Amino acid sequence: MNIFCDWKEEYTVPFICIMAVSIGFPIGWFLSYSEKIKSRFFKNTDTHKAWVNYVVFQKLISALFMGVLPGIAVMISSDLGLNELGINFRNFGESLKYIGVVGALILAVNYFATKSKANLAQYPQMRINNWGAREIMANSFAWFVYLLAYEFMNRGLLLTVCYHYFGSWPAVAINLCFYSATHIAKGVRETLLAFPFGLLLCFVTISTGGLAFAVIVHFILAMSTDYFSVYHNPDMKFTRA
């Protein structure tokens, strides 16, 4: 007879990591997309300001529950620190080579991909007409914090911890399953694309030992999607104000 509770000490850290990420991500997701919370931002205020504040809130609350709190849980329960979890400049020169090639490809593809009606209906998340310096800075800052926490969750915690305890391919398989699942709400296209893109992020993270490539490339993807979408949207424009 198999014993369900045959706990072993070596299970502790990966168990805490996977559970922390599995709990933290949905909490951050549901809080950031709560209609009750959203209504508070749009109550008794102008729509432009409400959109900016709401999207910044979405990114920061998600970062807290996806990256910060799971990270604290893992570091308390293990001898892994931020350096071991990818927050470092290890092999940064190698990362820059990947960033240059992949970043250029993303920009070229995204310029044309963002013209579609489906994309323009979804991006940018700030549904404002006029994009000045303040809006761009607020949007870019919020995205960077969010993506740093997001990649720390996916490649820093989930991939790295599983890699240490299970080996490379089991860690990659777990990571791709989780990563693709987090894109289901965004549709079939993004869910399917999460597999090859996620595999690339896993490969470079393991080979370099750092998150620089994952964070910066993901940031280029997000920023080009948002700002090319503003450029292509006839109802939106960049301003000097």
Image (cartoon, rainbow, N blue to C red):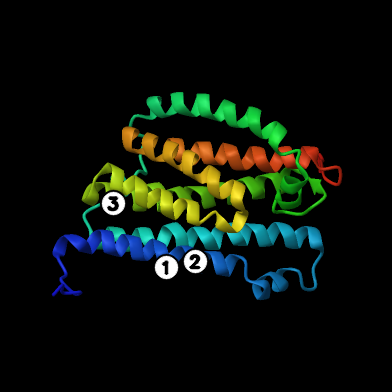
Query: Could you tell which of marks 3 and 1 lies nearer the N-terminus?
Result: 1
Q: Residue at x 45, y 27 (%)?
A: 98
Whole-Å distance between the Cαs marked 3 and 1? 17 Å
- Residue highlighted by disc 2: 26
Q: Which kind of residue does numbered mark 3 sit on?
A: Cys
Q: Identify which residue, 78 or 180, lies in the foreground.
A: 180
Q: Identify which residue, 181 or 146, lies in the foreground.
A: 181
Q: Identify which residue, 109 or 74, lies in the foreground.
A: 109
Q: Judge whether residue 115 can be spotted in this image.
A: yes
**Relative to residue 169, is residue 7 depicted above or below?**
below
Q: Residue at x 63, y 57 (%)?
A: 56
Residue 167, image x and y in percent? 24, 45
Image quarter (top left, top right, bottom left or bottom right) of the N terminus: bottom left
Residue 117, image x and y in percent? 78, 45
Look at the numbered disc 2 and give the secondary structure of its residue: helix
Residue 17 image-quadrant placement = bottom left
Contact, mark 3 vs mark 1 (Cβ under 8 Å): no
Image quarter (top left, top right, bottom left or bottom right) of the C terminus: top right
Look at the numbered disc 1 and give the secondary structure of its residue: helix
Contact, mark 2 vs mark 1 (Cβ under 8 Å): yes
Residue 86, image x and y in percent? 35, 43
Q: Residues within 10 Å of mark 2 (few under 14, many from 20)?
A: some
- Residue highlighted by disc 3: 162
